[in-house]
Image (spheres, helix red, strand yellow):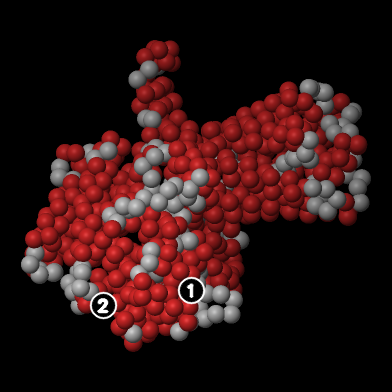
Amino acid sequence: MDEDVENILAGMMSHGGAPLDALAALLRSLRPGLRSPPAEAKLRDLIALLTNRPDLRAALRTVLLRLLSERHAVILFAAAGIYPETGVLAESLRRVSHKILPEADDAEQLKSAIDSVVSRRDLAWMETVSAATWADLIRALRFAEADDLTGLKRLRADLIEAARVVAHRIASAGLEAEMLRLDPRLENHESPFLALCEEVLTLTREIETATAPATEAVTGSHRHVLVLIDQCRQTIERVRRRARQQGASFHLTFRLRRLFQHLKRLETLSAIASAPDGNGDRERQGAALWVELATAECRRNDLRRFWRQSTELVALRVSENAGKSGEHYITESRPEYLAMLRSAAGGGFIIAFLAANKIFLATLGLAPLTEVLAFSLNYALGFVLIHMLHFTVATKQPAMTANAIAAAIEESQTGRERTLQPLASLVARTLRTQLAAILGNIGLAVPTAMLFGLAIWWQTGNHFVDPDKARQLLQEIDPIGSGAVLYAAVAGVCLFLAGLIAGYYDNLCAYSRIPDRLRQLVLPRRLIGRARWARFATYIENNLGALAGNFFFGFLLGGVSGLGMLLGLPLDIRHIAFSSAFWGYALTGLEFGVAWQVAMLGVLGVLAIGLTNLLVSFYLAMWVGLKARGVAFSQRRQFLAAVLRHFWHAPREFFLPPVSENQPRPENPESLQGKDSS
């Protein structure tokens, strides 16, 4: 064992000293260095030393008991690691101010003692030590041998009081207006949150009055508490499912996550308080709680972590509602696949004329701001028209498909081999659907652009796109000689943001009950008739998110170049469907008199732009979907291997639909019928 540890413990034995300074020095000695053993080994050596040296064991035990007898732990047990009651802005300001001017030590609170003993440098090694090792350390101290158990009695009383505090907070949160709106049974019938609070109060009274630990009454009450905690979790899940349909505020999402944390903390506190002596449960639970509380206290002023958690909650609120309305995103059957081709072809037809209008607007010599606004409206109104005609733009799909795959991955965490194969099949169906959408868009955008350009030439004798402009259009989609790929990535970010905006408006529509409020308006019903107005309200109910997403997507695309102009940066966008139409206009403007190498370079540029559009938007949507659900997908290699095996055995499924309707479909881990959310 390190001599420094023995010297620290010997110092505790000889003259006591300040408990906080001694414990801080002990933790520093356990911190692993570059050439020292790992923390687990050091802690095992400490356990062996305490086991063999009763004098050193008694010294450390005395210091700990003295600290516990002098400080309260209720706030530490009830609040550490739980989302704050205040809002995001207020909590951010608090963390910033406490980073600049740290708070003073509160001599009556155990949480302040942890702040003084544990530093952020200790988190890295404390979390690597197993809970079993920490539990062995607690057992090695043999607290039962102490002459004065005042510290343990006070700690136990604070733990019981903290359980009461957490139980009351759970009961209060379970009766908030948002919860009652989504689940009226919580008000009309017995609420599991209230029942849990009452049962926890009963359990704590039985623990305090029990003559022996873990009596039959205590054990029975604890089992009932666990059952009610499970019922509360089921209620929360039911509220979350209804919120996806009826909408919910960020406040509710925050409260539900906080409620989950309180239930987990209550489960731990009740388990420690009611655990019998001698079976090791109390030590194991206590060790896990110690690491959790120490980690939470060290990170309580971590602004970056807090903002990451807050953005994950926002992402959860938006991503759960993304894609409520629009077309199907993942085709299952041959008719669905052909329907996607037709829908995408219609989108390509419209985009060819949107591209022509953009070229025309650029020739008007408008003022910069006016030109940006004109481009934005051209994109926005065109995408809205495409949606209203039930057509499809290929690049608007990834946000929803990524969200669906993220949801399927979330389910797959409960079983690996059983669910990875359906996930691989899901990827295959997603890829072939995306390929169908791309082929449909390009397949009609290019010939429509060529025919329109030729028609203008035949009617007027002038090219719609003059040779100089045609060469410029080809240069802009050159994947090597221009920034086309980078600008395509910018467009991918816009696609991703449009998906989030669509999800936000879908949630807003449901949460604010906009369709019901529209149906109550008297004047429109008189002007166009009750039936027509009802159909309009129903259309808004099913399509508000998609309409908003499409409209804002257009302004995002049009506003990028304006932002670059304002900041003096070379910012622009490249979109596969528009780029393919521009390629068609350029060829007609040059009367198809270009070298085949130039034409093929344009084709490669269009494909590179499309691939970048899809990959960037898909990756961002996938990342947000996984983060929002708190899923750490650790099976990447196994998942990739499953996809490759599926491609080896059934490559056709990645490109073409089933041959017939009778062909068996692979198991789908989730219903993946999506709607246009961009």
Residue that appears at 38% across and 67% down: 17
Identify the residue at image location x=29%, y=71%.
Answer: 62
Position of 374 with respect to 508 (left or right) is right
Query: Within 10 Å of the Cα at label 2, are there few (<14), some (14-19), or many (20+) other Cα atoms?
Result: some
Q: Is residue 192 visible?
A: no
**Left or right of residue 678, residue 467 in this image:** right
Q: Is residue 576 left or right of residue 414?
A: right
Residue 142: assigned label: 2
Cα gap from disc 2 to disc 1, whole angstroms:
22 Å
Q: Amino acid at mark 1?
A: Ser
Q: Secondary structure at mark 1?
A: helix
State whether residue 658 is above or below residue 444: below
Q: How many marks?
A: 2
Residue nearer the viewer, 591 or 259: 259
Residue depicted at x 88% and y 53%: 596
Q: Judging from the image, what secondary structure is the residue with disc 2 in?
A: loop
| Crowd band around label 1 with a 10 angstrom C-alpha radius: few (<14), some (14–19), many (20+) | some
**Extreme bottom residue here?**
52
Question: In the picture, residue 284 is in which quadrant?
Answer: bottom left
Q: Residue at x 50, y 51 (%)?
A: 302
Image height check: is 24 above or below 37?
Answer: above
The image position of residue 566, as x and y in percent, is 75, 31
Closer to us: 309 or 342: 309
Q: Position of residue 292 (x, y in %)?
A: 38, 62
The three-letter amino acid code for the residue at tag 2 is: Arg
Snapshot quadrant of residue 636: bottom right
Residue at the disc numbered 1: 29
Residue 10 location, x and y as percent?
A: 39, 78
Q: Earlier in the sequence, mark 2 or mark 1?
A: 1
Q: Is residue 580 above or below residue 292?
A: above
Where residue 344 appears, as percent x and y from the top left, is: 61, 44
